[in-house]
C-alpha cells in the first residue's frame, strides 16, 4: 500500500524538507494552508499530515495548536525536529542591491526569525506575509521585480531563484518542530532513530482557584516527571480562560499518567492526553 503524506506547501517549504528527510518516496501532496492539511487527514483524503508546530526563535505556530485543539483533534504519531537556515532569495535576473529591494515576502515565522537582518539591511522594504516560505519563493520567481523571498535552499532550486544572501536568521540555533498526524500510527515509518518519547497533555484549571497551576505542576513534580514545555492558550470562551498544554518527556504509561489525571480531576481540572509519540532529530 502506498502511504500518502500531506504537508504545508507548495514545493520548497521547510515542511516539505522535513517530510523528504523523514520519509521515503511515498506519495506526497502539498496543501496551501495548515488547516487544509489537517482537514485532509481528518477526512481521510491523505494518510499522514505534517505541519509546523514550534520554532526555537519565534515560538509556537499558533494556527497549528489552535486548529488541533479547537477544530480537529488528531493523534500525533511523531515529532520531527529540523534545523532551519533562512536565505534571502531573488529572481535570477534581479541585478539590484539590497537597497533596491522593495518587498520582502515570507511566512510570519521566517520574517520573525530574520527581524534584525531586515531592520538593518532592508529597512525600506515592505513586509508581505505569505502562507509559507515556499509560496513567497513562488511569488519572487514569477517575474523580475524587486521582490525578495525568505526561504530555504530547496525553495531556491525549486523556483530557480538566486540566493542573494545566505543565513540571514538572527540566531544560529534555529530549529523547528513538526508534527506527524495520522489516524493510523502503524503506517508511520520514519527512517531515523528516535531520541526520546514525549506525551502532550491538555489541562484546564477550575476557575478562580488560588494555587491551581502550582498544584498541577506539583502532580508532575513529585512523580519526578520531567516537563519540557508549558504553554497557555486562550480557551476562546472569554478573557482570562486558558488551556495549559504541557509536554512531558516520557511515554504514556498506565501508572503515572492516570495518577496525575486522577489527582488533578479531584481538584476540578480537566485532563486530556493529546498524544504520546517519539521525537526524531534530523540533520539536513
Ligand atoms: O513556510 C514554511 O516553509 C513552513 O514550512 C513553515 C515554517 C516557516 C518558517 C520556519 C519553519 C517552518
Image (spheres, grey):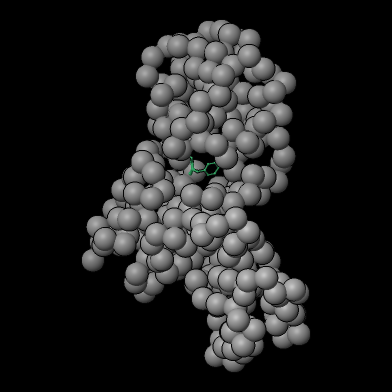
41 left or right, relative to 151: left
210 above or below 58? below
Expressed as whole percent of the image width and height from the top left, the position of residue 135 reads 41, 32
90 above or below 9? above
200 left or right, relative to 211: left
What residue is at 53 percent from the left and 8 percent from the top?
A: 95
Between 65 and 155, the one lying in front of the other is 65
Between 108 and 209, the one lying in front of the other is 209
11 left or right, relative to 269: left
253 above or below 98? below
Between 193 and 10, the one lying in front of the other is 10
Expressed as whole percent of the image width and height from the top left, the position of residue 76 reads 46, 67
What residue is at 58 percent from the left and 71 percent from the top?
A: 204
Expressed as whole percent of the image width and height from the top left, the position of residue 10 reads 37, 38
192 left or right, relative to 207: left
What residue is at 51 percent from the left and 59 percent from the top?
A: 237
Between 219 and 183, the one lying in front of the other is 219
What residue is at 60 percent from the left and 62 percent from the top?
A: 242
Q: Determine the image quadrant of residue 271.
A: bottom right
- Can residue 255 be spotted in the picture? yes
250 above or below 111? below
Expressed as whole percent of the image width and height from the top left, the position of residue 47 reads 30, 62
Quadrant location of the N terminus?
bottom left
Amino acid at each position: 500500500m502506498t502511504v500518502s503524506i500531506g504537508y504545508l506547501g507548495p514545493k520548497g517549504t521547510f515542511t516539505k524538507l522535513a517530510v523528504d528527510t523523514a520519509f521515503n518516496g511515498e506519495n506526497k501532496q502539498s496543501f496551501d494552508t495548515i488547516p487544509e492539511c489537517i482537514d485532509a487527514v481528518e477526512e481521510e483524503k491523505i494518510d499522514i499530515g505534517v505541519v509546523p508546530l514550534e520554532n526555537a526563535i519565534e515560538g509556537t505556530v499558533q494556527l497549528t495548536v489552535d486548529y488541533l485543539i479547537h477544530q480537529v483533534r488528531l493523534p500525533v504519531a511523531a515529532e520531527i525536529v529540523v534545523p532551519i537556515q533562512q536565505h534571502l532569495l531573488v529572481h535570477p535576473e534581479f541585478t539590484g542591491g539590497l537597497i533596491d529591494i522593495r518587498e520582502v515576502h515570507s511566512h510570519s515565522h521566517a520574517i520573525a526569525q530574520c527581524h534584525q537582518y531586515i531592520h538593518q539591511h532592508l529597512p525600506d522594504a515592505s513586509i508581505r506575509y505569505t502562507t509559507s516560505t515556499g509560496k513567497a519563493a513562488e511569488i519572487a520567481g514569477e517575474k523580475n521585480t524587486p521582490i525578495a523571498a525568505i526561504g530555504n535552499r530547496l525553495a531556491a532550486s525549486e523556483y530557480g531563484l538566486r540566493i542573494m544572501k545566505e543565513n540571514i536568521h538572527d540566531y544560529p540555533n534555529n530549529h523547528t518542530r513538526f508534527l506527524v498526524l495520522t489516524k493510523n500510527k502503524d503506517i508511520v515509518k520514519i527512517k531515523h532513530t528516535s531520541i526520546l518519547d514525549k506525551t502532550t497533555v491538555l489541562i484546564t484549571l477550575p476557575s478562580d482557584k488560588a494555587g491551581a497551576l502550582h498544584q498541577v505542576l506539583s502532580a508532575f513534580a513529585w512523580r519526578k516527571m520531567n516537563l519540557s514545555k508549558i504553554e497557555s492558550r486562550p480557551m476562546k470562551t472569554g478573557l482570562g480562560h486558558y488551556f495549559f498544554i504541557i509536554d512531558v518527556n516520557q511515554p504514556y504509561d498506565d501508572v503515572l499518567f492516570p495518577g496525575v489525571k486522577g489527582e488533578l480531576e479531584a481538584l476540578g481540572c480537566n485532563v486530556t492526553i493529546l498524544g504520546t509519540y517519539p521525537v526524531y532529530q534530523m540533520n539536513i
